[in-house]
Image: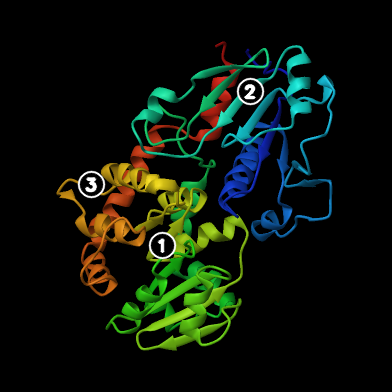
């Protein structure tokens, strides 16, 4: 169907939080962008408001319905609710194949005209994604389309708000702005001269080994880690619970535990650091727009299928005019348990530092490639508003 562009378009996103912050992080960015830049009336259905509040402190976890940043947020409590056709949005998005309420689907089928129904899939660099993007599936007398984010013009592209690149450039060109941003977290003027690393990973990452290699190295490192991330390893290094505000310096390494921050501030954290460890999908995409070297900790899957996804991305990303950036490929696979390394992080990190200029140049080139593909929100709306 083609959506009428003369009236305000309504859109519903259904989000089940599986990856703590990645799922809601993606859906919240998409919802805000659709409302701010395209004037879409967005309703975001979320089953876990507590996780949502970690990245959006204004969220009221007790509210059934609330308005935040122009978006209607509804607590998705169960599957038993019933709906009337008049309550159904023009566009319905189920994120990552979550099962939206049967009552909502029944009302979708009765609505005239029927809504555009999309399954927004997870991000992958695997080649099969291009062939599956925009494929259809008949369901309940309707047609559902599969919409894939991705890294080529044969996919839906990546989430990116208008003006993001200019805001990043201005921030990174202003050392005073970076100092002012990091100062409330306790970062000192002396620490600003160290190599700054943000750390966001899953609990099974070899964090203790990484911290030990930094501690015993000759290069001053400032590691900024959100509260709750790698709790045991960070607590072990600090010698106390790794709560927000905790800090410790041992050898060449200083670790500071940060509170969780709103999404816009997390972007600034990535922009302010020299190297970023990120995880899942949301922070993975934001690291790419930060234009800094990074390592991705991918969400684990059965039978190590996540290693296939990791290598598919590395085949695209860990390449420059001189060939494979071996240090990036080696460290990324080691971080994700996809290979062994004889010297571990004590050997991997120095190699990364040597290749940092190549990785920084690659980050800029990669951004330019991704910009050509447009942005996910705009591509999605263009798709549903065109006759299909």
Picture coordinates of residue 166, whole percent (x, y): 47, 49
Going 55% across and 18% down the picture, which residue do you hit? Answer: 137
SS at mark 2 in the image: strand
Q: CA distance from mark 1 to mark 2?
A: 36 Å
Closer mark to the observer between disc 2 and disc 3: 2
Which badge, 3 or 1, is on the more N-terminal residue?
Answer: 1
* Contact? badges 1 and 2 (CB < 8 Å): no
Depicted 373 relative to depicted 346: above or below: above
Front residue of 145/300: it is 300
Residue located beneath label 2 in the image: 117
Going 53% across and 18% down the picture, which residue do you hit? Answer: 136
Closer mark to the observer between disc 1 and disc 2: 2
Going 26% across and 43% down the picture, which residue do you hit? Answer: 315
Residue located beneath label 3 in the image: 319
SS at mark 3 in the image: strand
Locate residue 206: give its quadrant.
bottom left
């Amino acid at each position: 169907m083609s959506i009428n562009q003369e009236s305000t378009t309504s859109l519903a996103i259904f989000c089940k939080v599986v990856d703590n912050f990645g799922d809601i992080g993606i859906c919240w960015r998409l919802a805000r962008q659709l409302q701010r830049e395209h004037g879409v009336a967005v309703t975001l259905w979320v089953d876990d408001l507590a996780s949502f509040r970690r990245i959006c402190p204004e969220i009221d976890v007790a509210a059934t319905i609330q308005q935040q940043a122009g978006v209607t947020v509804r607590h998705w409590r169960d599957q038993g609710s019933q709906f009337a056709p008049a309550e159904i949005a023009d566009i319905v998005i189920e994120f990552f194949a979550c099962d939206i309420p049967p009552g909502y689907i029944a009302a979708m089928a009765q609505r005239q005209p029927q809504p555009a129904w999309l399954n927004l899939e997870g991000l992958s660099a695997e080649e099969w994604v291009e062939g599956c993007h925009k494929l259809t599936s008949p369901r309940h007398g309707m047609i559902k389309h599969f919409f894939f984010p991705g890294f080529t013009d044969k996919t839906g592209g990546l989430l990116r708000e208008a003006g993001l690149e200019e805001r990043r450039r201005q921030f990174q060109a202003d050392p005073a702005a970076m100092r002012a941003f990091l100062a409330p977290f306790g970062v000192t003027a002396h620490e600003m001269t160290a190599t700054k690393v943000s750390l966001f990973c899953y609990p099974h990452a070899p964090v203790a080994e990484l911290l030990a290699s930094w501690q015993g190295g000759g290069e001053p490192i400032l590691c900024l880690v959100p509260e709750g991330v790698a709790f045991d390893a960070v607590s072990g290094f600090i010698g106390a619970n790794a709560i927000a505000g905790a800090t410790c310096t041992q050898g060449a390494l200083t670790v500071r535990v940060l509170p969780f921050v709103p999404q816009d501030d997390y972007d600034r954290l990535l922009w302010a650091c020299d190297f970023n460890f990120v995880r899942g999908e949301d922070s993975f995409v934001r690291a790419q727009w930060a234009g800094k070297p990074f390592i991705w900790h991918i969400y684990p899957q059965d039978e190590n299928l996540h290693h296939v996804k990791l290598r598919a991305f590395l085949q695209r990303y860990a390449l420059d005019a001189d060939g494979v950036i071996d240090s990036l490929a080696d460290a990324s696979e080691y971080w994700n348990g996809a290979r062994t390394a004889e010297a571990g992080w004590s050997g991997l990190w120095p190699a990364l530092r040597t290749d940092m200029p190549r990785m920084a140049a690659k980050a800029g080139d990669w951004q330019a490639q991704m910009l050509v593909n447009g942005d996910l929100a705009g591509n999605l709306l263009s798709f549903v508003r065109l006759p299909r």
